[in-house]
Image (cartoon, helix red, strand yellow):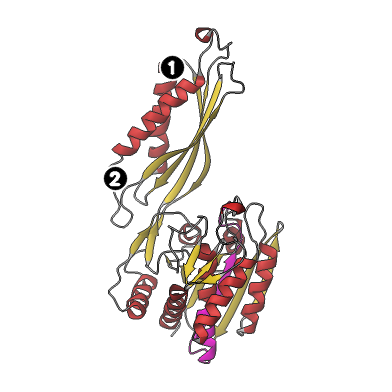
Amino acid sequence: MTSLEEYTSSLTSSLVRINSENPPGRETEIASYVSERLAELGLKAWVDRFDERANAIGVYEAGEGHSLMLMTHLDTVPAGERDLWRIPPFSGEIRDGRVYGRGSADAKGCLASMLGALKLLADEGWPIKGKLILAAVADEEAKNRGVRRLLAQKISAEYAVVGEPTSLQVCSAHKGILLLRVRFIGKSAHSSQPRKGINAAYAASDFALRVEKLGERLKVRHRLLGRPSIALTILRGGIKENIIPDSCELVLDRRTLPNEKLERIIKELRRLTERVAKARKVKAEVGIVRYLPAAETSTNSRIVVAAVKACSKILGERVRPRGFRATCDMCFLVHGAKIPSVILGPGSLLQAHTIDEWVSIDELVKAAKIYREIVAEILR
């Protein structure tokens, strides 16, 4: 192995071995570990603790110039049933050119490659000018409190690279997420006399099938992200096998595009809910559980051009901007802080959140080199 291979693979392994499942949110230990690595590379580094959570931040400044932020997250989704894992989820095992474990792809591999880029720059004597920030934030997998805290503290930059598993593709746009809770309210009765009640589960089932058809009719498109989507992800109702359910609840996951209006989406779903409620003679409630808007950076932006140039150079092929079909912290940078950003990192979304999650060591190395090229291009 080369030094960079050893550095990025062993660092990814070490990060995986620090459990940072969210919930409950275990970022303090890993934030301290990252802060130590940042300090070793010559950055001013610190851990920002808040609400029993923690961000790790490092800053390198060298004279006048532009500013760039490399940002990714410390937390992971839970490992789930550990007996299902062929390789223990927090072993960080290195095998057959891969690092295995929860968070290896999403997004501890990204963090290790960002630190690898900083090591390359440090070994070169920091041939940059301006301000470079590395921010490893908490709570990306739940309520995004880490990035909210970061921006509230006025830690910002002119441009940003968000580390997420994109298979080393430059993503200049991502879908938004709208989670809606729909509840149908009927009337309970003994199950031997179903006509005495109003079965809320039938209303919910009717609604679910209509949502499926609605998803097939969504025609709006985005040139990088394609079509939006809608999916029923939770359906629950009933309290006992011999009682007609008087309440049934659904949760819908609607992935949005930058060229869609939130008000129009909600209006369409409310109309659908009302039609079902009227037909089934039930009451209905609709509420927003969570909303993060889609985000997009112009492909002409300097950060997009720099990222495409860096990827094309390191990968040895022509790279074009793409869309990231999931949702991430980029929306806070673009909408809240007005920071032109791209999403870019090693690993695949196909591996993220899965059993036996892994990231390729080859991609870790290439990502470190790509990040280094982007930094050098922006902070020259």
Can I make out residue 160 in this image? Answer: yes
* Residue on which disc 1 sits: 280
Magenta stretch: residue 242 in it?
no
* Residue on which disc 2 sits: 220
Q: Is residue 215 left or right of residue 63?
A: left
**Could you tell me residue 242's position as x and y percent?**
59, 16
**Image quadrant where residue 210 sits:** top left
N-terminal of the pair, mark 2 or mark 1, is: 2
Q: Nearer the viewer, residue 142 or 102?
A: 102
**Could you tell me residue 161's position as x and y percent?**
46, 69
**Could you tell me residue 5's position as x and y percent?**
50, 81
Q: Residue at x 65, y 66 (%)?
A: 18
Tell me the mark number nearer the camera, choosing from 2 and 1.
1
What's drawn in magenta, residue-wise? 116-143
- In terms of secondary structure, where does tag 1 sit? helix
> Disc 2 marks which amino acid?
Val
